[in-house]
Image (cartoon, grey):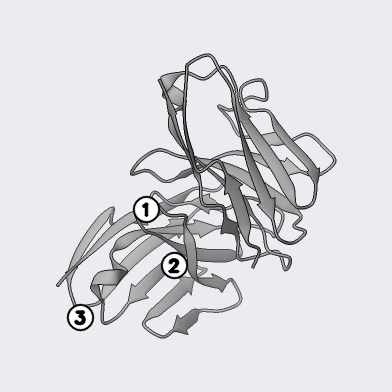
Amino acid sequence: GENVEQHPSTLSVQEGDSAVIKCTYSDSASNYFPWYKQELGKRPQLIIDIRSNVGEKKDQRIAVTLNKTAKHFSLHITETQPEDSAVYFCASLKSGNTPLVFGKGTRLSVIA
Amino acid sequence: SAVISQKPSRDICQRGTSLTIQCQVDSQVTMMFWYRQQPGQSLTLIATANQGSEATYESGFVIDKFPISRPNLTFSTLTVSNMSPEDSSIYLCGADSPRGYGYTFGSGTRLTVV
């Protein structure tokens, strides 16, 4: 089955710097790649997603890139702010009727 | 995307007892999923809840321990049976969106077994 690897497990950045989190997946049939942000004690919240027919997607300070050939995708957060501190999970999906497979998460700390 | 109400939000239970967790979605969704999340860990899929058929369980999870119901397209329950302290965790339900992507999650149930 699908396997999603996520790196790094922890990341600390200074406020205003950029943060990059990388994921790789194993199943070439996967075609949807969401990113979730989970604050302490709260549910995972979808922050951005990308489908396999697109190489890059941007939403204000966050962007996701996808390299289908290499089977990896990345989350980019620019101009980080303390409220970006959270655990971020990448995930992959083969079709709309299958469950998400999650990476192990990255704990991002933005230091003011 | 769908909005999911999950209850209870937390509970402390005696070992050997059972707890049923409920999830209500504000729109009809094809698939609902149940995940377990240990503190500081990722989400581990327990099972996929199919309407009108038995749930599909992942390796390591069995129906006798985690019976699931899915009576209609907006509701599902997960029961944690014959609980032991090892079952202490956060349990999350998830659902696909009506368009098939953008899965959302319930607020979670923090279960402590004593």
Which amino acid, mark 1?
Gly
The residue tagged 2 is A73
Please state which of the two labelled residues, at mark 3 or mark 1, is closer to the viewer.
Answer: 3
Q: What element carries label 3?
A: loop
Instruction: Report in which chain the residue with disc 2 lies.
Output: A
Q: Mark 3 and mark 1, same subunit?
A: yes
The residue tagged 1 is A105
Q: What element carries label 1?
A: loop
Residue that lies at the very extreme toward the bottom in this rendered image? A60
Q: What element carries label 2?
A: strand
Q: Residue A54 sits in which quadrant?
A: bottom right
Q: Which of marks 3 and 1 is nearer the N terminus?
A: 3
Above or below for A19 versus A105? below
Question: How far across and down, in percent of the image, does residue A105 sit?
Answer: 37, 53
What residue appears at the point 64 percent right and 46 percent down from the top-left corner?
A: B33
The residue tagged 3 is A16
Residue contact between numbered discs 3 and 1, judged by CB atoms under 8 Å: no
Residue that lies at the very extreme toward the top in this rendered image? B16
What residue appears at the point 55 percent right and 40 percent down from the top-left corner?
A: B8
Above or below for A18 versus B8? below
Above or below for B27 versus A82? above
Please state which of the two labelled residues, at mark 2 or mark 1, is closer to the viewer.
Answer: 1
Badge 3 local density, few (<14 within 10 Å), some, or many (20+)?
some
Which amino acid, mark 3?
Gly
Q: Earlier in the sequence, mark 2 or mark 1?
A: 2
What residue appears at the point 20 percent right and 78 percent down from the top-left corner?
A: A17
What residue appears at the point 36 percent right and 58 percent down from the top-left corner?
A: A39
